Amino acid sequence: MLNQLAFYLFASISILCGLGVVVASNPIYVVLWLLGALIAISGIFFSAGAELLGSLQLMIYVVAIAVFYILIITAVPWRKLHKNEQHNRLIGVSVLPFIALLYVEAFLVVMSGVSVSKNKIIETITKNYGNAEVIGIKLFSTYFWAFELMSVLLLISMIGAILLGRKEEKTYD
């Protein structure tokens, strides 16, 4: 009962923080709302009994990715970018039904649990080995190439942020 109450509390906090990410106009506030959402999602993992995922959520996303976003915000010349394009808040709000649909899907997946997995293989591995082994087995067997692709994508985005944020040298003809 207490785990379910904690789940609903963290889920509502993550939804509110997700709305704050979409609605906020200042990039610093967007990152702060994102931090709130990521911490709430970590709380969801802890309340669901996935301690390893909750810890990884805190270490990887809350610490590393949020610092990376703050680095991008401080490195990118925002005034120069705002001159070239207009910010349309209507576009950000128009994706809210899709975000709500994703939350409904995540809610259904959590409520159905791992007991509906094929041949109950995840449930048996969790009982026999534990939470960390399940993550390691799935991450480095089934999702290995997706994991590596995401690391390359993060590297490319970091290089892009550095290129966007570098100072332009004045050249004289």
Image (spheres, rainbow, N blue to C red):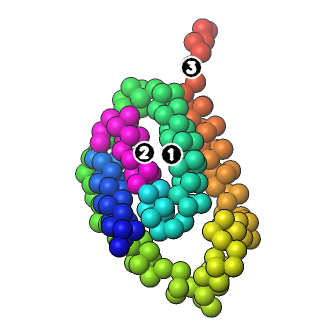
Q: Which residue is mark 2?
A: 35
What's the residue at 63%, 76% (across, down)?
126
What's the residue at 25%, 51% (across, down)?
90
Q: Is residue 137 above or below residue 69?
A: below
Q: Tag 3: residue type?
A: Lys
Q: Which residue is mark 1?
A: 62
Mark 1 or 3, nearer chain start: 1
Q: Residue 106 in the image: state x and y as whole percent.
A: 42, 71
Quarter of the image for residue 103 reads: bottom left
Q: Which residue is mark 3?
A: 167
- Label 2 vs label 3: CA separation? 29 Å
Q: Nearer the viewer, residue 66 or 48?
A: 48
Instruction: Give the quadrant of the N terminus.
Output: bottom left
Instruction: Give the quadrant of the C terminus.
Output: top right
Quarter of the image for residue 166 reads: top right
Residue numbers of the magenta segment? 24-40
What's the residue at 53%, 32% (across, down)?
71
Task: Tell me the chief SS of the magenta region.
Answer: helix
Q: Is residue 158 left or right of residue 99?
A: right
Mark 2 or 3, nearer chain start: 2
> Which of labels 1 and 3 is toward the front?
1
* Mark 2 vs 1: CB contact within 8 A: yes
Q: Is residue 106 above or below residue 157?
A: below
Residue 157 is tagged as none
Q: Tag 1: residue type?
A: Val
Q: Tag 2: residue type?
A: Leu
Q: Nearer the viewer, residue 154 or 129?
A: 129
